[in-house]
Structure formats: structure tokens, C-alpha cells
């Protein structure tokens, strides 16, 4: 069994949860914050049997879209500089960042 930790954009979250649930995947949705943009995103925990891993990945790929975003995130500020004016930069926020972990056991007690 695998655990997918999928970090996605809030805009895609409702549709992805619905799509995964309708295809029989179990999903837990967490409200999270990206370290770079310091903006809200969504993290889904999806436990899947090994044989369903590719299917889950296809659903994620189909639903989640990359988007361009402008930011002047404070995390760009060089350490120790106080009078720094951040300038806007454009970043491409991915469709989904997915970690695939091996699961030793799943117990429902
Ligand atoms: P954020 O950390 O808010 O990053 C949003 C987007 O900003 C990133 O999109 C990337 O295009 C850009 N970015 C991030 N760090 C950067 C840097 N140091 N310099 C320039 N641009 C930078 P994605 O790569 O698609 O990541 C989307 C979200 O996925 C991230 O939001 C973060 O919440 C998560 N993420 C991505 N890689 C991760 C990792 N290795 N570990 C944990 N979470 C990760």
C-alpha cells in the first residue's frame, strides 16, 4: 500500500476530492500553507493499494492545473537587510506536488 501526500492549489481541491471519491479512493483533506508564497494551498492524504497507484495519479494529473502567480513574498528578503523593497516575480505553481510513501500497515480500530 502507498500513501500519497498531494499538495495542490485550493482552486482544484473540490473537484479533485469529488473525482477521487467517485472512483473509490479514500481521501483526507488538510488546509495547508506554502512556505514560499505564504499562501493557502490544500494537501490531500490518499491511501491506495499498490495496484491503484497509477489510477490515482492519473486522476490528480487530469484535474490539477499549473497556474502563473505574481508574488513579492517576504521569504525572498535577504537575511539581515531591513530596508529591502521586494519586487514582484512570476512563479509557476505546479498542478500538484505528490509524495509517494510506502505504508507498512493500515489499521482501522
Ligand atoms: P509554495 O512553497 O508556496 O511555492 C509555490 C511556488 O513558488 C512553487 O510551486 C514554485 O514554483 C515557487 N517556488 C517555491 N520555492 C521557490 C524558491 N525558493 N525560489 C523561486 N520559486 C520558488 P510548486 O513547486 O508547484 O509548489 C507548490 C507548493 O507545493 C509549494 O507552495 C509547497 O507548499 C509545496 N511543495 C513544493 N515542493 C515541496 C517540497 N519539496 N516539500 C514540501 N512541500 C513542497
Image (cartoon, rainbow, N blue to C red):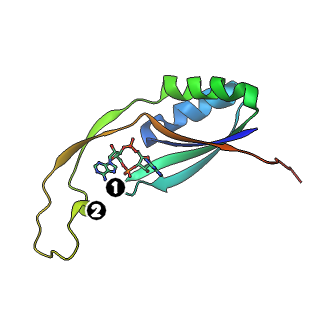
Image-based side of 39 in relation to 71, left or right: right
Total marks shown come to 2
Q: Residue at x 67, y 29 (%)?
A: 53
In this view, the residue in front, 73 or 30, is 73
Image-based side of 17 in relation to 9, left or right: right
Where is 55 relative to 25, above or below? above
Residue picked out by circle 2 = 75
Give the SS element for disc 1. loop
Give the SS element for disc 2. helix
Quarter of the image where the N terminus is located: top right
Q: Residue at x 61, y 31 (%)?
A: 18
Which residue reaches farthest right?
Answer: 109
Q: Position of residue 24 (x, y in %)?
A: 73, 28
Q: Position of residue 19 (x, y in %)?
A: 60, 27
Quarter of the image where the C terminus is located: bottom right
Q: Position of residue 5 (x, y in %)?
A: 59, 44
Q: Residues within 10 Å of mark 2 (few under 14, many from 20)?
A: few
Query: Do the CB atoms of the residues marked 2 and 1 lie less than 8 Å apart?
Result: yes
Q: Residue at x 21, y 65 (%)?
A: 77
Q: Any atom of ligand 1 within 8 Å of the CB at mark 2?
A: yes
Residue picked out by circle 1 = 36
Q: Any atom of ligand 1 within 8 Å of the CB at mark 1?
A: yes
Q: Residues within 10 Å of mark 1 (few under 14, many from 20)?
A: few
In this view, the residue in front, 50 or 86, is 50
Q: Earlier in the sequence, mark 2 or mark 1?
A: 1
Q: Position of residue 95 (x, y in %)?
A: 43, 33
Q: Which mark is residue 28?
A: none
Q: Residue at x 79, y 48 (%)?
A: 104
Residue 78, quarter of the rendered image: bottom left
Image-based side of 104 in relation to 45, left or right: right
Where is 107 relative to 93, above or below? below
Amino acid at each position: 500500500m502507498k500513501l500519497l501526500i498531494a499538495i495542490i492549489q485550493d482552486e482544484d481541491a473540490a473537484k479533485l476530492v469529488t473525482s477521487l471519491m467517485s472512483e473509490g479512493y479514500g481521501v483526507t483533506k488538510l488546509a495547508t500553507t506554502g512556505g514560499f508564497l505564504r499562501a493557502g494551498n490544500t494537501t490531500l492524504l490518499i491511501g491506495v493499494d499498490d495496484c491503484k497507484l497509477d489510477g490515482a495519479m492519473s486522476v490528480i494529473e487530469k484535474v490539477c492545473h499549473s497556474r502563473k502567480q505574481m508574488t513579492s513574498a517576504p521569504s525572498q528578503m535577504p537575511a539581515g537587510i531591513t530596508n529591502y523593497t521586494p519586487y514582484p516575480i512570476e512563479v509557476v505553481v505546479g498542478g500538484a506536488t505528490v509524495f509517494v510513501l510506502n505504508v507498512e500497515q493500515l489499521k482501522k480500530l
